[in-house]
Amino acid sequence: GVAAGVPYAGAVMTAMRTSRPSFILAVTVLTVILTLFGLAISPDGGETWKVIANRTLAIFVIVGAGAFAIYAISARRRSTRQAILFEQVRRRRVQDTNIQLMRSAEARTEFLGQISHELRTPLTSLTTFAHILDQKSDSLSKERIKAHSEVISRSGRRLEVLIDDMFDASG
Protein backbone atom coordinates (compact mmCIF):
# COMPACT_ATOMS: atom_id res chain seq x y z
CA GLY A 1 0.00 0.00 0.00
CA VAL A 2 2.75 2.42 0.93
CA ALA A 3 4.80 1.33 -2.06
CA ALA A 4 1.84 1.97 -4.33
CA GLY A 5 1.48 5.49 -2.97
CA VAL A 6 5.17 6.42 -3.13
CA PRO A 7 5.25 7.39 -6.85
CA TYR A 8 2.16 9.53 -6.38
CA ALA A 9 3.52 11.04 -3.15
CA GLY A 10 6.68 11.83 -5.13
CA ALA A 11 4.54 13.64 -7.69
CA VAL A 12 2.89 15.64 -4.90
CA MET A 13 6.26 16.54 -3.35
CA THR A 14 7.58 17.54 -6.78
CA ALA A 15 4.56 19.79 -7.18
CA MET A 16 5.71 21.53 -3.99
CA ARG A 17 8.47 23.20 -6.00
CA THR A 18 5.86 25.48 -7.58
CA SER A 19 5.00 27.06 -4.20
CA ARG A 20 1.37 27.14 -5.28
CA PRO A 21 -0.94 25.29 -2.85
CA SER A 22 -3.74 25.14 -5.46
CA PHE A 23 -1.45 23.22 -7.86
CA ILE A 24 -0.35 20.85 -5.08
CA LEU A 25 -3.98 20.28 -4.14
CA ALA A 26 -4.84 19.54 -7.77
CA VAL A 27 -1.96 17.05 -8.08
CA THR A 28 -2.99 15.42 -4.78
CA VAL A 29 -6.63 15.03 -5.92
CA LEU A 30 -5.51 13.69 -9.30
CA THR A 31 -3.21 11.09 -7.74
CA VAL A 32 -5.95 10.01 -5.32
CA ILE A 33 -8.30 9.57 -8.28
CA LEU A 34 -5.66 7.55 -10.12
CA THR A 35 -5.16 5.37 -7.03
CA LEU A 36 -8.91 4.79 -6.76
CA PHE A 37 -9.01 3.97 -10.47
CA GLY A 38 -6.25 1.43 -9.81
CA LEU A 39 -8.49 -0.11 -7.19
CA ALA A 40 -11.07 -0.86 -9.86
CA ILE A 41 -8.57 -2.46 -12.24
CA SER A 42 -6.24 -4.14 -9.79
CA PRO A 43 -3.64 -6.03 -11.87
CA ASP A 44 -2.57 -8.44 -9.17
CA GLY A 45 -5.93 -10.16 -8.93
CA GLY A 46 -5.45 -10.58 -5.19
CA GLU A 47 -8.00 -10.70 -2.52
CA THR A 48 -10.31 -7.71 -2.53
CA TRP A 49 -9.71 -6.73 1.08
CA LYS A 50 -5.92 -6.65 0.47
CA VAL A 51 -6.31 -4.50 -2.64
CA ILE A 52 -8.62 -2.12 -0.79
CA ALA A 53 -6.24 -1.96 2.18
CA ASN A 54 -3.23 -1.29 -0.07
CA ARG A 55 -5.01 1.40 -2.05
CA THR A 56 -6.36 3.02 1.14
CA LEU A 57 -2.85 3.11 2.56
CA ALA A 58 -1.59 4.60 -0.70
CA ILE A 59 -4.28 7.30 -0.50
CA PHE A 60 -3.20 8.13 3.06
CA VAL A 61 0.41 8.45 1.89
CA ILE A 62 -0.63 10.72 -0.99
CA VAL A 63 -2.90 12.92 1.15
CA GLY A 64 -0.19 13.09 3.84
CA ALA A 65 2.37 14.19 1.27
CA GLY A 66 -0.04 16.82 -0.08
CA ALA A 67 -0.85 18.10 3.40
CA PHE A 68 2.85 18.23 4.27
CA ALA A 69 3.67 20.07 1.05
CA ILE A 70 0.97 22.68 1.65
CA TYR A 71 2.04 23.05 5.29
CA ALA A 72 5.69 23.46 4.28
CA ILE A 73 4.82 26.16 1.76
CA SER A 74 2.67 28.08 4.23
CA ALA A 75 5.39 27.79 6.90
CA ARG A 76 7.99 29.06 4.42
CA ARG A 77 5.71 31.97 3.49
CA ARG A 78 5.15 32.81 7.16
CA SER A 79 8.86 32.78 7.90
CA THR A 80 9.53 34.90 4.80
CA ARG A 81 6.92 37.45 5.93
CA GLN A 82 8.46 37.51 9.40
CA ALA A 83 11.92 38.01 7.93
CA ILE A 84 10.63 40.87 5.78
CA LEU A 85 8.94 42.51 8.77
CA PHE A 86 12.10 42.07 10.83
CA GLU A 87 14.17 43.67 8.07
CA GLN A 88 11.72 46.58 7.78
CA VAL A 89 11.91 47.19 11.53
CA ARG A 90 15.71 46.99 11.42
CA ARG A 91 15.85 49.48 8.55
CA ARG A 92 13.51 51.87 10.37
CA ARG A 93 15.74 51.69 13.45
CA VAL A 94 18.83 52.37 11.35
CA GLN A 95 17.09 55.33 9.70
CA ASP A 96 15.97 56.67 13.09
CA THR A 97 19.50 56.31 14.43
CA ASN A 98 20.91 58.10 11.37
CA ILE A 99 18.43 60.94 11.83
CA GLN A 100 19.39 61.22 15.51
CA LEU A 101 23.07 61.27 14.60
CA MET A 102 22.50 63.96 11.97
CA ARG A 103 20.51 66.07 14.46
CA SER A 104 23.21 65.59 17.04
CA ALA A 105 25.89 66.68 14.57
CA GLU A 106 23.82 69.73 13.58
CA ALA A 107 23.27 70.65 17.25
CA ARG A 108 26.99 70.24 17.93
CA THR A 109 27.89 72.47 14.97
CA GLU A 110 25.36 75.11 16.05
CA PHE A 111 26.57 74.94 19.65
CA LEU A 112 30.20 75.34 18.63
CA GLY A 113 29.28 78.28 16.40
CA GLN A 114 27.44 80.02 19.23
CA ILE A 115 30.22 79.32 21.75
CA SER A 116 32.80 80.59 19.28
CA HIS A 117 30.84 83.82 18.80
CA GLU A 118 30.23 84.27 22.53
CA LEU A 119 33.93 83.77 23.33
CA ARG A 120 35.23 85.98 20.54
CA THR A 121 33.18 89.04 21.53
CA PRO A 122 34.88 89.62 24.93
CA LEU A 123 38.19 88.36 23.56
CA THR A 124 38.09 90.98 20.79
CA SER A 125 37.45 93.70 23.39
CA LEU A 126 40.33 92.40 25.49
CA THR A 127 42.84 92.34 22.66
CA THR A 128 41.69 95.65 21.13
CA PHE A 129 41.80 97.67 24.34
CA ALA A 130 45.03 95.99 25.48
CA HIS A 131 46.58 96.97 22.14
CA ILE A 132 45.34 100.56 22.51
CA LEU A 133 46.79 100.78 26.00
CA ASP A 134 50.06 99.25 24.84
CA GLN A 135 50.46 101.51 21.80
CA LYS A 136 48.97 104.80 23.00
CA SER A 137 49.31 104.83 26.78
CA ASP A 138 51.56 107.92 26.61
CA SER A 139 48.99 110.04 24.73
CA LEU A 140 45.86 108.91 26.66
CA SER A 141 44.47 110.67 29.70
CA LYS A 142 44.12 108.89 33.00
CA GLU A 143 40.32 108.75 32.55
CA ARG A 144 40.69 107.07 29.14
CA ILE A 145 43.24 104.62 30.49
CA LYS A 146 40.90 103.82 33.38
CA ALA A 147 37.91 103.37 31.00
CA HIS A 148 39.93 101.07 28.76
CA SER A 149 41.13 99.09 31.80
CA GLU A 150 37.50 98.68 32.93
CA VAL A 151 36.53 97.33 29.47
CA ILE A 152 39.44 94.86 29.67
CA SER A 153 38.41 93.82 33.18
CA ARG A 154 34.73 93.46 32.24
CA SER A 155 35.63 91.41 29.16
CA GLY A 156 37.89 89.17 31.24
CA ARG A 157 35.08 88.55 33.76
CA ARG A 158 32.68 87.82 30.88
CA LEU A 159 35.13 85.23 29.51
CA GLU A 160 35.42 83.66 32.98
CA VAL A 161 31.62 83.38 33.23
CA LEU A 162 31.34 81.87 29.75
CA ILE A 163 34.10 79.34 30.44
CA ASP A 164 32.55 78.42 33.81
CA ASP A 165 29.17 77.97 32.10
CA MET A 166 30.78 75.69 29.51
CA PHE A 167 32.39 73.54 32.22
CA ASP A 168 29.09 73.37 34.11
CA ALA A 169 27.23 72.35 30.94
CA SER A 170 29.80 69.68 30.06
CA GLY A 171 29.62 68.19 33.55
Image: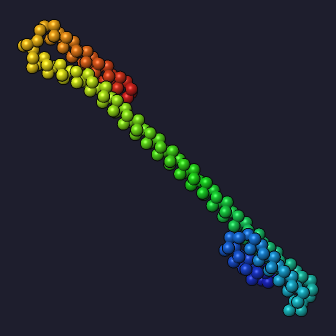
Q: How is the image coloured?
A: rainbow
Eyeballing the image, is 14 above or below 75? below
Query: In this rendering, does residue 77 appear at all?
Result: yes
> Which residue is drawn at the image coordinates 47% and 43% (left, top)?
99
Residue 168 horizontal side relative to residue 82, left or right: left
Q: Quadrant of the N terminus?
A: bottom right
Which residue appears farthest toward the left when viewing the image?
Answer: 138
**x then y, percent, for residue 120:** 26, 27
Return the residue nearer the eye: 140 or 21: 140
- Give left or right: position of 6 versus 138: right
Left or right of 57? Residue 65 is left
* Residue 144 in picture, x, y percent from top left: 16, 10
Q: Residue at x 34, y 33 (%)?
A: 112
Q: Quadrant of residue 127?
A: top left
* Residue 47, quarter of picture: bottom right
Q: Position of residue 125 (x, y in %)?
A: 22, 21
Please name the residue shown 76% across and 81% down the image. 8
| Extreme residue toward the right, this view | 48
| Mark count | 0
The answer to whether residue 36 is above or below residue 84 is below
Residue occupying image coordinates x 30% and y 28%: 117
| Residue 68 seen in render | no
Quadrant hosting residue 41: bottom right
Q: Quadrant of the C terminus?
A: top left
Q: Nearer the viewer, residue 142 or 161?
A: 142
Instruction: Specify the farthest residue to the top.
Output: 143
Q: Position of residue 49 (x, y in %)?
A: 92, 83
Please tell me which residue lies in front, 139 or 145: 139
